[in-house]
Image: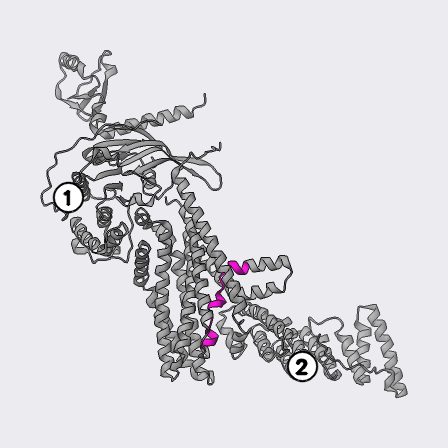
Amino acid sequence: MIALLVAQNTFREVVRDRVLMGLVIGGLVLLAVTRIASPLAMGEGLRLTVDLGLSSISWLGLLVVLTVGTALVSKEIDRRTIFNLLSRPLPRPFYLFGKWLGLTVALATVAAILGSVLWLVVALLGHGHYAGSIAEAVYLATLELAVINSLAVMFSALSTPLLSALYTLGFFLGGQWCGDLRRLASHCPDGLKVMLESAANVLPNLPLFNMRTLAAAGELTSWTHLGLASAYAALYCACVLSLAAAAFESRDFK
Amino acid sequence: MIVRVVPAASPVRDAIRRRMALAWAAALAFGAGACSLAGYAAAKLPAPAPFEELAYYPSGQALQPATLGHAESAADLAWLRAVQYYGEHRQTDLRFTQMQHVFEVLSALSPSFESPCIFGAFGLAQEGRDFPAAEQLMLHSLERRPRSGRLAFELGFLYFVRPGGRDLRKAAEYFELASRLPGSPASAARFAAASRQNAGDLRMAYQLWSEVRANSPNRYLRELAEREIDKIAEAIATGRAEIAVRRMGTPAVIIR
Amino acid sequence: MPEPNTVKPPRSDRQPLAGERSIPGHARRGVDPAAGPAVSIRGLTKSYRHPWTQKVTRGLEPLTLDVHRGEVFGYLGPNGAGKTTTLKILTGLLKPTGGTAMILGEPIERVSSRARIGFLPEQPYFYDSLNGLEYLEFVARLSGMPGRDATRAARAWLAKVGLGERERQVLRKYSKGMLQRLGLAAAMVHEPELLILDEPMSGLDPFGRRDVRDLILEQRERGTTVLFSSHILPDVEALCDRVAILLEGKLERVATVGDLIDGTAPVVEVHVEGARVFEIPPRLAPVIERSDAGGSTALRLREPERLQELLGWLLSERIAVNSVTPVRPSLEQLFMAAAERSAFQAQSERRPA
């Protein structure tokens, strides 16, 4: 499929940009730091390593989305490399999908590498049974990054890299409060309730992808959770990319 | 001159509009699906235990460097979560096992953020039925802000309404401190005097009421001070403390 | 809607260039006259509205034009005339305000209309981190070539444009000329039936321009239609079967280069000794343009049939004649004249009644 070509090219670009290498090195350094600091955690060294290891995947991934993802399309427009692509039989929605997919696969690769190293470290500490919970947490973190990436690509298609980064960060922060908005809405009068619930629906439901607390204790989540999170991520990304396609369709490239 | 251009019929624009409409329709369909799933997930999956993440940090001091200069904002966010924590447990099990720690962290992050500490202390003392924890929380907060008249006054009030038995002497001590510090309510001196009086420290109470009579800008307070001074004078003269000392009720907590 | 110019393009008997390599399997494409034009534009317009002032600027007035299959068509105009606008509308990068266009029988609103075209944008940019081979493979596959074919074609075209030894070099290390050649290769790698080139000679040295000219001629020999925009008129004169002149968004004229030049009145230039001071007689003054330069005077006679009269007078005045040369106006001169006429017309239209 033609979008896969764009995805492959995007993946190649991101890898060669050395961004991913920096990400992996950053993650590994952080893991090393957690091991060095673990004696200070008074017996909670394992939890420190797992917690911070998983958090670093999310934070570093977010950093890449905010720096690379938000410039993914706008950079091509500014540098006019997009002329060479869109003058070919490449539908614009497929182009956007390809850009999103390429970066998402890159982020998934890094998450998988860091997750594997984390499991290795934990296994060497005698807790190999953490494999399942770490795998689940990494999978959900990847879904979370895919969702944020879709927002980054959408904003990148419509705006400058700086504004795209700000909007994306805003949605990320707002998304962390989705659950609280829903809980607040349940205690509010009707008009306000509808407003808050609408806001909670528009924002990405990021707490759905957070099982770091369970993983820190080596616990697994339910298949229902994994299934719901996967389906939600797919639908949310599809929605955002469709909106991006609608706006991108009428864009002129002078 | 503004030229109004009515675009001629253009198959290209029509095709673009059709594709845009299709994309919008797809977005709405996917969005509706995502919203339904999110609502279903919120109902079906267990809600995350609130405030777990803050409970993990050893102390506010340890957390502060991690905020990269944004300790105040972090404290604000922590306050929002703390309120939820209180609300959840207030409505369910009335067990606030993490409350002291949570508010200690908050206070350490932002010592100037006094309201949460006061709220937390009274919550602990009353609904939480853990007066020692409440006392510790307020004392630590006051240690961090020794010049805060408000904190001193509220600490005094905490002792004043201690469930199961007021500690009037301690209350008076902090009311007196508050009256000398900036930011305390105008009634601090009066509370100090009344507390001393009802604790039976008549000579000290006499002094305090005299100060109120001499310094208060409020006429009613001055008149009140005058009356209490007369009562105390009579009580001392007759040796009958009950003229000046009033038996105050025992505070209790009723949770509905 | 006015019908476009229907003059058929002449065929040239071009011999292959020395040392020219052909791409294996690149047979000459047959041109079927019944197939319709390669590009058919009807009433195409483009307007821009300022987002704040709402002022509308016309980028392109209603344009009607055909480009025949197999011809090399030059699209001339100064900067800002609307050439790039037209080409970008055809390639889907801009959406027109009105009108229609077809490419090889398919309407431009269909994405599939771009499957058989190759586009070279002005001053093309590429992905810095890719090498030449990777880039050409990528664009070839985007245009529908299967993987292996794309790799073979990419290698062949890199060699053809003189970048064969640099196929693994990253594009950020390419010079401007190399990038332009790569852009041409990218436009041609998938064997398009129609080439749309926006200022293909831009920024190239004379050697680079020669190479591009040779490539365009080779494509014509293969039966590929070439539509290219330029403001370098000698190249257009040398390459094009037909030329369209665009000025301020309006199509001024479409004709063969020969017709354009033949249609203008020839001039005879007579160079005489300039040492002597002399005055042109009143009867000849209206048809003569005089310019003095150093020790020589040039007299441009606009009515060549009165050459004998002029020579007779010069002889009678004992003015030495150095040379007599018939001068055919170049495309450049025609273009400048057309531009001046257009500017004059626009000014008259703007003057209040």
Callout 1: SS: loop
* Residue located beneath label 2 in the image: B129
Q: Where in the figure is residue A189, as x and y percent of width and height?
A: 65, 60
Given the image, what chain letter belongs to the residue carrying mark 1? C
Taking B233 as reference, is A98 left or right? left
Q: Is residue B122 something that shows in the picture? A: yes
Q: Nearer the viewer, residue B43 or A37?
A: B43
Q: Where in the figure is residue A150, as x and y percent of width and height?
A: 42, 58
Report the quarter where the C terminus of chain B lies. Answer: bottom right
**What predominant SS class does the magenta segment belong to?**
helix
The question of residue C48 being in magenta is answered with no
* Colour pattern: one colour
Q: Where in the figure is residue C242, as x and y percent of width and height?
A: 23, 31
The question of residue A209 being in magenta is answered with yes
Say if mark 2 contacts mark 1, CB within 8 Å.
no
- The circle drawn on residue C27 is 1
B126 relative to C102, above or below: below
Q: Nearer the viewer, residue B22 or C103?
A: B22
**Start-end of magenta stretch:** A199-215
Q: Nearer the viewer, residue A123 or C58?
A: A123
